[in-house]
Amino acid sequence: PFLSFPISKLPLPGAKAEKRKSTTATMAPAKQSGQKKNVDNINSRIKLVMKSGKAELGYKSAMKCLRKNKGKLLLICNNCPALRRSELEYIAMLAKTQVHHYTGDNTALGTACGKHFNCSVLTITDAGDSDILTAKE
């Protein structure tokens, strides 16, 4: 039979097993970084927009909103393809629309919107009760 560990490490029959002292170090609780707070802050604002305002999910509807000059804020996830990202940024610049680069990936952005699918682009057309358009992070 093939052994995946050296034989010298096996305990001998009848030999007492070595007792190891358990050393548990008490660590101070990790401080919540500013990056994490910003992500939580933007996520809560996105949830409020989805509940009280109007938003479009997806690349095609984002392009339509930007061409019609209806979008007020464009959120792009960090794993959106570079060509698509630059195209969205260019159209948003022509439409004089704000662009925010979301720190999470498309799964995190979809979850922040309250959906059970991925979303690489979110266009906010009406902020509702949220202050997402005025807040600078």
Image (cartoon, rainbow, N blue to C red):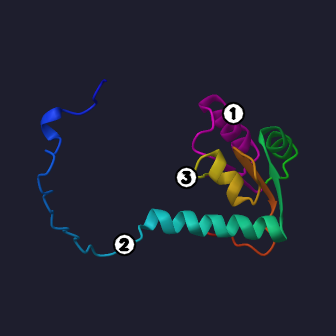
The residue identified by callout 3 is 103
Name the residue type under label 1.
Glu
The mark that comes first in sequence, 2 or 3, is 2
Residue 94 occupies which quadrant of the picture?
top right
From the image, which quarter does the N terminus lie in?
top left
Depicted 123 relative to depicted 83: above or below: below
Give the number of the mark in front: 1 or 3: 3
Q: Is residue 62 visible?
A: yes
The residue identified by callout 1 is 87
Residue 54 percent coordinates (x, y):
85, 61
Does 80 appear in magenta? yes
Calculate the distance from the C-alpha at mark 2 to the C-alpha at mark 3: 19 Å
Q: Which residues are magenta?
A: 72-100
The residue identified by callout 2 is 31
Residue 127 percent coordinates (x, y):
78, 67
Q: Is residue 9 left or right of residue 110?
A: left
